[in-house]
Amino acid sequence: MHAHDREPRREDGRVVLAGARVVTPAGTLRSGWVAVLDGAIAAVGRGRRATADGAPVQDLGGAWLVPGFVDMHVHGGGGAWLSSTDLEEVGRAVRFHLGHGTTSMLASIATSPLDSMLASAAVVAAAAGGPLAPALAGIHLEGPFISRERRGAQDPDAIRDPDPAAMERLLEACGGWARMVTVAPELPGGRELVRQIARSGAVPAVGHTQAGYEAAIAAVDAGARVSTHLFNAMPGLHHRDLGTVGAALSREEVVCELVNDGVHLRPEVVRLVFQAAGARRVALVTDAVAAAGMADGDYDFGRVPLRVRGGVARLIDGRTIAGSTLTMDAALRRAVMEVGVPMEDAVTAASSTPAGAIGISERTGSIEEGKAADLVLLDDDLEVVGVMAGGRWVAREAAPARVSAATART
Ligand SMILES: [Zn+2]
């Protein structure tokens, strides 16, 4: 894909994207249009009467137009880590996922020695507040206060018991950009840690946990609002022992992350979660590592070596899954085509639900007047053919949709 390919003149910041299947919160508009003005969505409608007088019109030829994806759990991609202390590398990871339609993402900082988490947090916070805004929407701290038994690919030597002072240092290093923290609430002091995170303004997430049903429910009562990659790195669901999974599914306040890559979860389980919780409580996430978009090979996840074979990242033991090589467009595609989730629900789970969960839904996450013009253009196979972020095409397939020089009339 090439940036800014044959884009109509838009030096006045206006364009009307027309002739698309526009997925809005109120449903899909056939032959819908979206008027973009100064980086925001100025109006949305259907039919021929595009509103913006004098604005150039781009005919999208019947393609899907959906809101930019929001990935609240992602570590890297395109060979780069979002948690790098090298700003240039963070930027490469952001641009990789932007190219796959993710217009807002949290940088997930995995469990590693406290000093290295602090250093990562400081760099990512500066980038989120500066050169990589608004695509880099904040930080997700995945640990270090998690269960050793359920560590998955997290660095075992860096895992620690809840420590309010260390938590405070981490939150401070994030400089207000900590939007989510994954903790195991059953650890000593875990529930108080959930309260501390909630007080800071970040969202407490339950994950990498051994919590049983009662401990998980108590965490929700203390302010937990997200279940980190539901089913993965937590006890499963049993009819007399509902565990963390049962607690997450049964509480309306909880958004359930799903790594829908066909490896972490069977498609039938993904379908069940959509049926049980509804798309407004399901967030598709990638949990992608730097290997996403790259060839098979060996990668380092902090100090933990990973081996990627057939696009599946595992620890060197060859068993434990270690993040994914997923991208959000692939997660959406799989939800619709392999799992059978209706398009509108899959879009909700890829955009508006995660945007709400991490507190950015005022700005983005749906195609509605006043929101940022964060948009993804998908063909009939749900492959990305264009990505607009803040009113600018950041990725566009070489053969652009038909561009009309005609002026729209009101
Ligand atoms: Zn993760």
Image: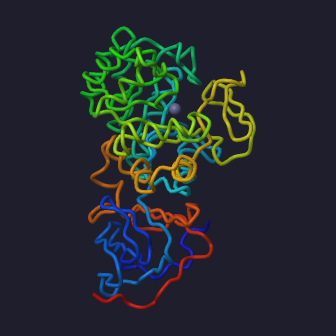
Residue closest to the eye, 328 or 127: 328
Name above or below for residue 41 compared with residue 343. Answer: below
Relative to the observer, which residue lies in front, 172 or 333?
333
- Asked if residue 384 lies left or right of residue 355, the reply is right
In the image, is residue 30 above or below residue 296? below
**Relative to 192, is 335 on the left or the right?**
right
Q: Position of residue 248 (x, y in %)?
A: 36, 28
In the image, residue 314 lies at what x, y percent? Answer: 67, 29
Would residue 149 be seen by someone viewing this image from the given angle? yes
User: In which image quadrant can residue 16 be found?
Assistant: bottom left
Question: Quick check: 6 above or below 294?
Answer: below
Q: Where is residue 38 in the image (x, y as percent from the top left)?
A: 33, 70
Q: Quick one: quadrant of the C terminus?
A: bottom left
Q: Which of 389 and 255 is in front in this view?
A: 255
The quadrant where residue 371 appears: bottom left
Name the residue rendered at 41%, 46% in the picture: 128
376 lies above or below 33: above
Coordinates of residue 389 in the picture (x, y in percent): 43, 62
For the N terminus, give its image quadrant: bottom right
Residue depicted at 48% across the width and 41% down the height: 271
Query: Can residue 75 be seen in this snapshot?
Result: no
How is colour applied across the structure in the image? rainbow
